[in-house]
Image (tube, rainbow, N blue to C red):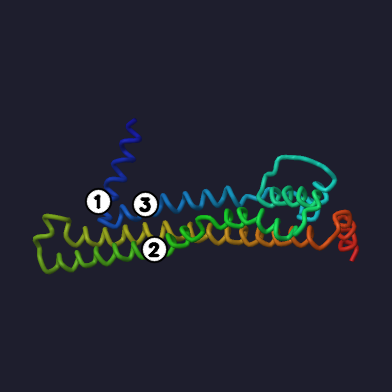
Amino acid sequence: MMAVLEVVGLVKELFQAGGFVMPPLFICVLLLWYGLGYRFWVLRSPKKMGVRDMLDFYRAGNRRPANSIVEQAIQIGVELKKKHTKYLRYHLDTAFYDFEREIGKFSVLVKTIIIISPLLGLLGTVVGMVETFDSLASMVLFSQTGGIAGGIAQALITTQMGLAVAIPGLLMHNDQNKKQQQIEKDLVQIKYLLCSQPFSSIATARKNNEIQ
């Protein structure tokens, strides 16, 4: 209980030292990591087989719970192919639309927060420096807000907070974008393989490509 109270006290002091910029930055932290966490879960791809291998696996009638979006898409595509669905490409585009939308979810939000956070920190820096120069002109602020020391502290804390939010977010966002692009390529490959080849020749085509 004492540890919790100490943490709450530290957070309160941090908010007071950082000024009015700290609440928006704290909200940015919550939204950023919610978005990153959601995308991390959606973009997970613990697949041990490539797209062609998974197509052959499900074409042979095997079943197992899908553990990634790519595998879910392959299961749906194989079922449509087995039913000899007319206009297969149209049905695949329709079926994969939700997957394509899901992997892009919260991407814009994350990118926006990464851009906004350093700007909020810079705003806090400017406000802190203004307070510092006001303190030089009016010694009254020394007794009210800590004067020069208080202004410089506010400037440094908000800058640090803005960068602390943006830098990890940027690194994770870039990594997740690469995963998103790979999944998009896999979905395109699934459509191509299912639509361009007779179902029985998928495995044969894969073997021929491996030989070449």
Left or right: where 4 falls relative to 95: left
Considering depth in this image, is 130 or 107 the residue closer to the camera?
Answer: 107
Tell me the amino acid under the disc marked 1: Gln
State yes or no: discs 1 and 3 in contact (Cβ < 8 Å): no
Instruction: Identify the mark nearer the N-term, 3 or 2.
Output: 3
Tell me the amino acid under the disc marked 2: Ile
Tell me the amino acid under the disc marked 3: Ile
* Crowd rating for badge 2 (residues with CA inside 10 Å; few <14, some 14–19, many 20+): some
Q: Residue at x 29, y 62 (%)?
A: 124
**Dot 2: what SS?**
helix
Q: Nearer the viewer, mark 1 or mark 3?
A: 3
Residue 123: % across, % down: 30, 65
Q: Quadrant of residue 165?
A: bottom left
**Dot 3: what SS?**
helix
Q: Quadrant of residue 203?
A: bottom right
- Whether 192 is drawn above or below 46: the answer is below
Q: Residue at x 55, y 52 (%)?
A: 39
* Crowd rating for badge 1 (residues with CA inside 10 Å; few <14, some 14–19, many 20+): few
Q: Which residue is mark 2?
A: 116
Disc number for residue 16? 1
**Dot 1: what SS?**
helix
Q: Nearer the viewer, mark 2 or mark 1?
A: 2
- Whether 55 is drawn above or below 167: the answer is above
Residue 209: % across, % down: 87, 63
